[in-house]
Image (spheres, rainbow, N blue to C red):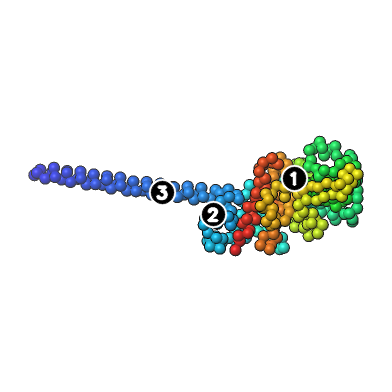
Amino acid sequence: MYTNQPDFRSRNARRRRRRRLRIRVCSSLISIALVCILIAFMYLITSKKQSPGMEGSFSNQNVQNAGLTPADADIKITEKDIDLSSLYSPNAILVKLQSGEVISAHGEDDKIYPASLTKIMTAILAIENTPDLDRSTVLPYEIFSGLYAEDASMAGFLPDETATYRDLLYGILLPSGAECCLTFAQDIAGSESAFTDMMNSKAAELGMEHTHFTNTTGLHDTDHYTTVRDLSVLLEYALKNNDFRTAFTSQAHHTQPSELHPDGFTFSSTLFTNLDSSEASRGRILGGKTGYTDEAGLCLASLANINGREYILITAGADGSHTTAQFNILDAIHVYDQLENIQ
């Protein structure tokens, strides 16, 4: 009656061992699959974290490094693919100048401090309210002590020096001269405060709804603010003026002789001074205005001609200073590199 019991138990034991073996094999396969999925996921995440101007740029040089020509490479981007979210600058806007179309933007309506980008407004108002830019004026002695105390950027004019208004205009836009701003303000409005009222009125006229100025130079004030969208509206407007455009796109300017500078003197654009020679020689960046304060970070308003089209790019808030890499300019180069490769 019990002669088959050992065989029965043996068969059951073998079945249990086989079942456990199958479970272990399945568990191992599932574990391997999960590891593979995790590795693939980490690779995708890592590949997206590209440095602006480096891996993230669809430049001709990158294509050539891969052993391909730009025509052969399977890289097709359009204006809609231009992404400003990976720039060093947290606030940026790219506009096609002819149509006013916003191509791309990031943080465009955030409140920012404009630093010396303020001087775009100062310059265009100076032009519009000065009948003869070739007439001379005297830089008031009393404006200099405060500017020296604030360590404001200066063009190089001296107290009580005689200069033409045109020289002062270039002094605003190229070396970012605060003494030129205050001279225009006093001559046009009687004081910087009154001129600032004119700046705010102009901002309202242009629809710059999130802008408020408290000075002509961009020296820091918590109540002196704007957005990169508003600044793009301002620059688009200013570039319609020939005197502004000519100064904005100049690399350097030599002043008329004066008693204090008998041979005149030369100042250069802060943008072109910081462009490397290879980029400057390409001629695609036509001009620009830099800006910096500790609170504003590195800022830039630039104009470029890419494939026969003009674009303006406003960036603000990049980390760094005058003594570091100029991340505002690197951002512009990165964006214009992408525009050169649109299909």
Name the residue carrying label 2.
65
The image shows residue 4 at horizontal and vertical percentages of: 11, 45
Amino acid at circle 1: Ala
Residue located 85% across and 52% down the image = 166
Looking at the image, which is closer to me, 334 or 146?
A: 334
Disc number lying in front (2 or 3): 2
Q: Say which label, 2 or 1, has the lower sequence index.
A: 2
- Which residue is outermost to the front? 263
From the top left corner, tell me how far across and down residue 119 is, in percent.
79, 49
**Gap in Å between the C-alphas at discs 2 and 1?**
39 Å
**Residue found 91% across the figure and 53% down from its top:** 135
Dot 3 corresponds to which residue? 36
Q: Nearer the viewer, residue 286 or 51?
A: 286
- Residue 100 appears in the picture as rendered: no
Inspect the image, locate mark 3, and give the three-letter code of the amino acid beneath it: Cys
Using the rendered image of the protein, determine whether residue 283 is visible from the camera's viewpoint: yes
User: Residue 59 is drawn in which quadrant?
Assistant: bottom right
Residue 85 relative to residue 221: left or right: left
Circle number at residue 115 = 1
In front: 220, or 140? 140
